[in-house]
Amino acid sequence: MKAGFVNIFGKPNAGKSTLLNTLLGEKLAIISSKVQTTRHRIKGILTTKDYQLIISDTPGIIEPKYKLHEKMMTAVKEALEDADVAILLHDLTDKDTTESHEIFAALKLKVPVLVVCNKMDKVGKERTAEAVSFFKQQPYCADATAISAIKGLHTEELLQKLTDLLPEGQPFFPEDDITDLPTRFFVGEMIREKIYELYEEEIPYHTTVLVQEFKEKSTLVKIQADIIVQRDTQKGIILGEKGQGIKALGMAARGEIEKFLGQKIFLELFVKVKPKWRDNDTHLKEYGYH
Ligand code: GDP
Ligand code: MG
């Protein structure tokens, strides 16, 4: 038996969340075409008779401009230190391999690295082969491969290469667990995902979601969540004219959560203004960014 921790690294939008979801066959991590949606470390657990992989989707590598970003950088480092194997994700739709290569080399990882070139569905065979052979030649690279995370292309090969690099060992988690994070966390992420979809530009970046209540009743699940913003104007935007905004958000989020839980829910959303939540460490802790 092989067992170990795998972390997926890569620039924002490289396809980390998509890959995690494809590997796990469940919609676990928040996916958005906008950057920096993954603020937390998300673990997924994949168990077969031969191996157990515990996979994390880490935040993108970004500037420590705000305190929140520093937390993200710390999360990246913590993930690095935890891993048995690192997947470094390269986006084949980037103009070339230079930028990924520079980041990958700078990480100076002590764990085995599998470079995975993603989005092969979007580029030619030649470009894909070139990138794979380029990475295979790099000293930090134990092995390299190409996939399409979104189409599920060559993911079996990826899993084979991953398990080759895993240490021998017994499973860490019971075989039917798919994640070590509580359901209410995913509920918050799904609401956040809908905020990204429904609101413009910087609004989602000034917003966090706190699930205050998660009660399983006989016929449905009652969920109450707070949407935290920094200013009254942002609250106004979230609410929308005559509450149309929050109503649309509630409906979209409810649909998504019901699909995920396979159960009817009653969802209540409140918008609260807490100035400077991004810069205040106490608040960050309160909101789960440890
Ligand atoms: P993350 O920021 O690294 O977690 O990236 P996401 O998983 O959120 O994906 C970013 C965007 O790339 C989304 O619009 C995905 O649908 C898209 N994407 C991810 N994987 C693929 C792929 O294999 N092919 C194509 N064409 N698009 C992909
Ligand atoms: Mg992501």
Image: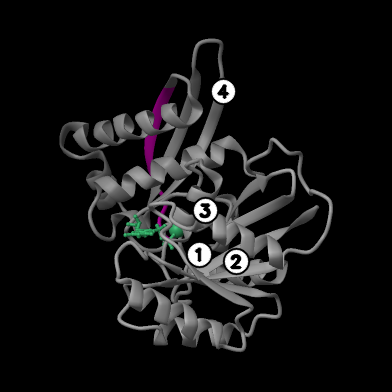
Magenta stretch: give its range.
266-277
| C-alpha gap between disc 1 and disc 4 | 30 Å
| Label ID, residue 75 | 2
Sequence-first disc among 4 and 2: 2
Indicate the amino acid at tag 3: Leu
Task: Determine whether 223 is above or below 51 in the image.
Answer: above
- The quadrant of the image that shows the C terminus is bottom right
- Which label number is shown at residue 215? 4
Which numbered disc, 1 or 4, marks the residue that appears first in the sequence? 1
| Quarter-of-image position of residue 244 | top left
Q: Secondary structure at mark 2?
A: helix
Q: CA distance from mark 3 to mark 1?
A: 13 Å
Residue drawn at x 48%, y 88% is 102
Cβ–Cβ below 8 Å for labels 2 and 1?
yes
**Marked residue nearer the N-terminal end (3 or 4):** 3
The tag on residue 59 is: 1
Find residue 267 and report its horizontal and vertical position in percent.
41, 26
Residue indicated by mark 3: 20
